[in-house]
Amino acid sequence: MRIAVASGKGGTGKTTVAVNLAYFNGVEIFDLDVEEPNAHVFLKGEEKIRNAYRKVPEVKDNCTGCGKCKEVCKFSAIYVIDKAYPLHELCHSCGACAYFCPENAIEEVDRLTGKIVEVDSNPKLTYGVLEVGEASPVFLIKKVKELMGKTAIIDSPPGVACPMVESVRDSDFVILVAEPSPFSLHDLRLAISVVEDLKIKFGVVINKHGLPFRIENYCREDGIEIIGKIPFKREIAEKYSHGELLFEYSSLFRDIYSVIS
């Protein structure tokens, strides 16, 4: 099954859960946080790197400036003065402008959107690195997901915007990582709303368990299953900062996987 690890905010321990869950259960992992991937800090090996491209419009000299391309573009990625001028940063590569151009004055060309890295680690890690200047990571996330089989652990981007939605889409289960703080509770509620809209089963892992804020009360009151608790300990933070796995807690991550599967 595909298990996505997500969170409403950054810094809750999402990658900690994802890499340890993958390692101690022998499941391939995909780091889809392509703007700031860091699973490779924990899982090392020989890397195979290839470029990823997306199609963007290029306007030819026979453009008459009729404005049809601007009319059909739902993302305001083309403006027209005397001719059409594409805004590649906003383009979603749908191809509508080229398809509907009455003068056949628009052709689609490749634009580098990032890199896809496959790491010969144990377990195997695959991740994307977004090209500097790319406004949206969604296309690269989709390209990385093309390499994904039916069984995988997914390290999702933080937040609840389009990158997170695309990352967890088609997953069988979503682990929402939260920490005992008012900010994390606020963003957990947002993440739960998104996952419920996507109709994906989910459970909560509480990181830094032992801090005084009682995030568990909210979960209990709303009938949300808590499937794991990672204690608030200095040694865990130190291991994370050194790129080390949590061997002392291997049974915890095996138990979490067992509960889900």
Image (cartoon, rainbow, N blue to C red):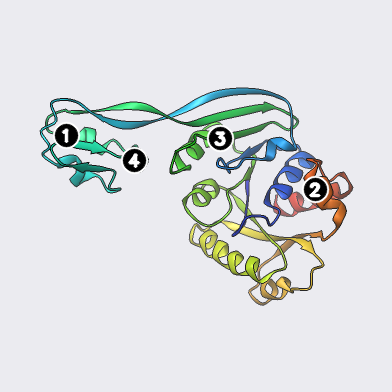
Q: Amino acid at mark 2?
A: Arg
The circle drawn on residue 101 is: 1
Using the numbered discs, state the Cα–Cα distance from disc 4 to disc 3 in whole angstroms. 19 Å
Residue at 55%, 49% (x, y): give it. 168
Where residue 18 sits in the image (x, y, percent)? 70, 46
Up-down: is 143 above or below 48? below
Residue 1 seen in the current view? no
Mark 2 residue element: helix
Which residue does the numbered mark 2 point to in the structure image? Answer: 254
Up-down: is 217 above or below 170? below
Q: Quadrant of residue 232?
A: bottom right
Residue 6 seen in the current view? yes
Q: Earlier in the sequence, mark 3 or mark 2?
A: 3
Which residue does the numbered mark 3 point to in the structure image? Answer: 129
Mark 1 residue element: loop
Does 100 sit left or right of 44 as displayed?
left
Q: Amino acid at mark 1?
A: Cys
Q: Amino acid at mark 3?
A: Val
Using the numbered discs, state the Cα–Cα distance from disc 1 to disc 3 in whole angstroms. 33 Å
Q: Nearer the viewer, mark 1 or mark 4?
A: 4
Q: Nearer the viewer, residue 90 or 185?
A: 90
